[in-house]
Image: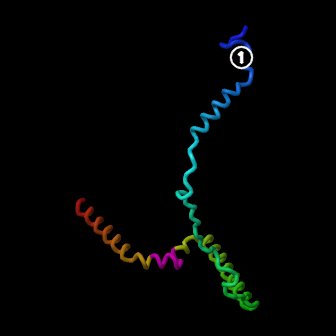
Amino acid sequence: MNWSWGEEGEYDEEPSVDYMEYLARRASCSVLPDPPKAMVAPAPVPKRKKSLPGAADAPAAILSREEASVLSSQRREEVRRQVEEAERYRANPLLYFCSPQVKAWLARQQLTIFILIINLSLAYLFFKLLT
């Protein structure tokens, strides 16, 4: 049984040449004409900054062996001190309160801490008066 609407084999053949010409004519009608050459502006080329100075512009700051040795020994000593300090803080966490960073923070916050203490003492006195 054939369930197609047309005659048998009608859709199996190639489209006619007239139909192809019709499609080609329709397609050419929908294409926009090229814009005039005077109206098309060339795309501007962005100017880039140089990312790094050239090798010729770079100062010739080459360290001698002695200077490099001194700097590397200073760095090793600094790393050793940091490791020792971290071990001390790990062994006794109360040392954080005596650290220079905490002392500097307390020095910067003196007025704020003073006002906080005054406010707490006034609140305590107020509640004592109420009871």
Q: Quadrant of residue 109?
A: bottom left
Q: Residue at x 43, y 79 (%)?
A: 107
Residues drawn in magenta? 97-105
The kind of secondary structure element at disc 1 is loop
Choose between 86 and 76: the one closer to the eye.
76
Image position, residue 41 (x, y; %): 55, 60
Q: Is residue 59 above or below residue 52?
A: below
* Quadrant in which the C terminus is drawn: bottom left
Q: How many marks?
A: 1
Please name the predominant secondary structure of the magenta segment in the image: helix
Q: Looking at this view, name the residue that lies furthest to the left.
A: 130
Q: Amino acid at mark 1?
A: Glu
Q: 80 or 91, which is in the foreground?
A: 80
Q: Which residue corresponds to mark 1?
A: 10
Residue 90 in picture, x, y percent from top left: 62, 70
Q: Residues within 10 Å of mark 1 (few under 14, many from 20)?
A: few
Residue occupying image coordinates x 63% and y 30% = 22
Q: Is residue 110 magenta?
A: no
Q: Quadrant of the N terminus?
A: top right
Based on the displayed image, in which of its 4 quarters is residue 123 positioned? bottom left
State left or right for residue 13 relative to residue 118: right
Q: Residue furthest right?
A: 65
Q: What colouring style does the render use?
A: rainbow
The answer to which of 102 and 41 lies nearer the viewer is 41
Compared to residue 94, the image places residue 14 above or below, namely: above
Q: Seen in the image, is 128 located left or right of residue 47?
A: left
Seen at 73% across and 12% down, the residue is 8
